[in-house]
């Protein structure tokens, strides 16, 4: 029994130590004056090699001094390789600033890795609410935009029991790989104006470094 406890303790220590070493390597990619957002350090296998890769969502330390700070937030993507960590993506534009959420506050809603896909969520507004989701996939030694979803709606009405999110709705979902696009538009009284599905002309996928926020 004592031997079993010793082995388990050793394994736990080894795992903790290797994790600390790895985190020390990850921290070297964080620029001076920046730190991770809450929930802004996620891991997952981006290139399907069985190893954990890393995504950092970073905020400027200046944000602590100003509730409506509009400085850049950074996203950095790191792969584990036999030669150590390798940066395969970075952006100053994909993460919205702390003051970009309007009266609702900081629009940062989180980041996750799901089936090798990086998913970035933002949310904001007041009586009129909006959400924005962008999806990136690793390929050709970089991160590429493969999906975009935006939603905008009037939060005051539930459309006579149909649920909040329909009144004044302006929804768009695009799969940039297949070109599939879905659009839903409703008036404030919930009347359906448009619900279409179509194929867009396919274009080369946008690289993370090329991505810019677009107001629709």
Image: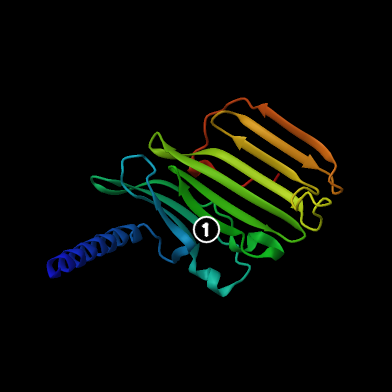
Q: Residues within 10 Å of mark 1 (few under 14, many from 20)?
A: many
Q: Which residue occupies 47% across, 59% down?
A: 40
* Residue at which label 1 appears: 73
Numbered-mark total: 1
Q: Residue furthest bottom?
A: 65
Q: What is the quadrant of residue 129 in the picture?
A: bottom right
Q: Residue at x 56, y 45 (%)?
A: 134
Give coordinates of residue 33: x percent, y percent: 44, 66
Question: Where 35 sits versus 95, above or below?
Answer: below
Quick one: 151 or 79, which is closer to the camera? 151
Colour theme: rainbow
Nearer to me, 23 or 12: 12
Q: Position of residue 175 (x, y in %)?
A: 58, 34
Establish if 67 lies above or below 81.
below
For the C terminus, the quadrant is top right
Compare residues 205 and 181 and report the one nearer the observer: 181
Q: Is residue 181 left or right of residue 60?
A: right
Element under disc 1: loop
Looking at this view, name the residue that lies furthest to the left.
Answer: 3
Question: Residue at left 40%, top 61%?
Answer: 31
In x, y percent, where is residue 155? 77, 57
How far across and down, in percent of the image, does residue 41 sit?
43, 58
Q: Quadrant of the N terminus?
A: bottom left
- On the rendered structure, is 99 left or right of 26? right
């Amino acid at each position: 029994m004592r031997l079993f406890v010793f082995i388990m303790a050793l394994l736990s220590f080894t795992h903790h130590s290797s994790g600390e070493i790895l985190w020390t390597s990850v921290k070297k990619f964080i620029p001076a004056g920046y730190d991770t957002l809450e929930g802004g350090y996620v891991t997952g296998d981006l290139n399907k090699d069985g190893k954990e890769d890393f995504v950092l969502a970073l905020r400027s330390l200046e944000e602590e001094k100003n509730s409506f700070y509009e400085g850049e937030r950074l996203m950095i993507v790191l792969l584990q390789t036999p030669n150590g960590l390798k940066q395969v993506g970075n952006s100053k534009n994909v993460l919205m600033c702390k003051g970009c959420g309007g009266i609702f506050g900081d629009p940062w809603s989180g980041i996750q890795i799901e089936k090798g896909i990086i998913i970035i969520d933002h949310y904001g507004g007041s009586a009129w609410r909006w959400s924005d989701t962008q999806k990136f996939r690793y390929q050709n030694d970089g991160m590429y935009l493969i999906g975009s979803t935006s939603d905008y709606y009037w939060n005051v009405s539930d459309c006579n029991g149909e649920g909040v999110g329909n009144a004044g709705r302006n929804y768009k979902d695009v799969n940039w790989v297949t070109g599939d696009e879905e659009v839903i538009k409703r008036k404030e009284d919930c009347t359906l104006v448009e619900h279409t599905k179509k194929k867009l002309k396919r274009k080369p996928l946008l690289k993370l470094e090329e991505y810019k926020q677009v107001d629709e």
